[in-house]
Image (cartoon, rainbow, N blue to C red):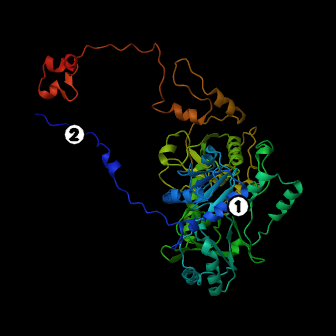
Amino acid sequence: MASAPPPVANSGEDAITQIIDVEPEAFAAGSVSLEEAYEVDMTLDEIEKGSYQRVALQFPDELLQDAVPVFRAIRDRLPAEKELYVLADTTYGSCCVDEVAAQHVDADLIVHYGHTCLSPTARLPVIYVLTKRPIDPEHAASALASTSKDSLGDVKALLLMYDVGYAHKAELVHKALEAQMSLPVVLSHVDRRVNHSKKGKAREEEPSPAASTAEEESTAEPVDSTPADGVSDLAPAPTPEGLVPSSALPSKPAPPRVAFSLPEGVAVEDCAIFYLGGESLGLNNLLMTHGKCSVWSYDATTQSARLESGKTNRMLMRRYAVVEKAKDADVIGILVGTLGVSAYLPLITHLRELIASHQKKSYTVAVGKLNPAKLANFMEVECFVLVACPENTLIDSKDFLRPIVTPFELELALTSKSWTGDYILDFTTLLSTSTFGQDFVDPSMDEEDEEGPRELTCRSLDRTDADDLSAQASALAIRDTSSAVARVLGSAAGEFLSNRTYRGLEPRYGMDAPAVMEDMTGRGGVARGYGFEKGEEGPEGRGAGAEGEE
């Protein structure tokens, strides 16, 4: 009797029955109650003050185990007419407010739990309930002081910054550092009401012009040492006329989510930075945006402090290499990494105009959470620019086929602006810089500016005017007399497609001879046992299938 053929693949049962150990993150240190840890009383008070009717509770994946108890604790103390929803599996990063999911239930308030980037939201007011991670203030101050005491040199002041999970203990660490350091120690303030106060007031009444003027003056430099109360819309970017409608641009700058006041005569470049937190996207962003400062970090998990400045140079070198690759890209994809951060639409419009003015083609792509498999589907795109919150905008993974740059890096790649070492990740700062969008190439000029040595690449030259790009894209293609695959005129994407071995399905009506049906004998028997498997190789075994099955 013949043995059964080996299985091509397993049934998948192992993946279904696999047991995965999940380590849920502790939301608060110590033995505090759930209502105290998740600030239920504060949440109910804000809902009552703002007269909100539909409230969305946004939980990250690591805190979903507490979603039902928190929901019940709030629901039991709310009037019956108020609605409550739980949001999970965010559209993009869990640090950002998911306004897209909240709009599906027509929510008028979002309560965000856990770690957050505090990026300014575009539409809805937000209440932030931060994670309270455990930390020993005395040990943190001692470790930072002992690690840095021999390396401060010409430093004039110390700036204490921290992950939002340590905000509840930052004041204690600050006092301990002041007792151990001879230099002045400046404590930064994280304003978790930055996306709530002003948006809540806007629902009740529109501000008068006089009030708007007073608010503008109150946000001017220098930044007050107290946390900023509230947020306004973003400032318009000083770009050439016609790029962005004035109605689409924000009217006022938002106050910084992290504020501090330095001593008189001391600049940020004169400070050393102490950071409370371990390896994270927030620490990487701090190193990039403060590359001129020495940074020491303290990891409360391992209770160790270390100097991070050597890591900054390596990160900047990798980012500079990515910028050089972006200079040679003819097709650039704009990745939409957020739909909730304020001013993302004006920024995307800026990028489109900037790319088109340099005779390059752009595609806007929204793929949700990024992974290499998704972006590998866009083979025509030679470089991507990611529009996302500051904590998610730096993609430094070798798994992606094409380089991914930030909007600031794309500006460096396409303009003659030199890199001074400053690094901008925040939308507000990027749109309000005086040089962004002003170095546009005149499409009527064919002469190219002389630049420094660059990597040489070989490709066919087919230059077209920027004004013709939109017309070519709408016309798409022209079919030649041989009915070959259509080709986009003057397009790098069309050139890439024409060089492909497989170009998709092509209708070849009347060009191929019809297939000839051959009289072939099929298998006999049923699926559980064909005739040839039982040793019946004759006509009855291979051709009697139809009669046997009947």
> Which one is nearer the viewer's eye here, 33 or 118?
33
Whole-number angstrom distance, CA of label 1 to CA of label 2: 62 Å
Q: Name the spot of residue 35 as percent of width and height, x first.
A: 57, 65
The amino acid pointed to by label 2 is: Pro
Name the residue that disc number 1 marks.
194
Q: Residue at x 18, y 17 (%)?
A: 544
Q: Quadrant of the N terminus?
A: top left
433 on left or right of 395: right
Q: Which quadrant of the structure image shows residue 151?
A: bottom right
Q: Secondary structure at mark 2?
A: loop
Q: For residue 237, say whether it is visible.
A: no
The amino acid pointed to by label 1 is: Val
Mark 2, other Cα within 10 Å: few <14 / some 14–19 / many ≥20: few
Q: Which quadrant of the structure image shows residue 536?
A: top left
Furthest residue in direction right, as rendered: 210
- State which mark lies toward you, 1 or 2: 1
> Which one is nearer the viewer's eye here, 227 or 452?
227
Q: Quadrant of the C terminus?
A: top left
Q: For residue 136, say whether it is visible.
A: yes
Residue 115 sits above or below residue 475 on the image: below
Q: Which quadrant of the structure image shows residue 21?
A: bottom left
Q: Residue at x 31, y 13 (%)?
A: 517
396 on left or right of 389: left
Proximity of marks 1 and 2: CB atoms separated by less than 8 Å: no
462 on left or right of 433: left
Q: Name the spot of residue 171 as percent of width and height, x first.
A: 64, 77
Name the residue that disc number 2 marks.
6
> Which one is nearer the viewer's eye here, 404 or 95?
95
Q: Name the spot of residue 181 as percent of width and height, x first.
A: 64, 85
Q: Residue at x 83, y 61 (%)?
A: 215
Q: Secondary structure at mark 1?
A: loop
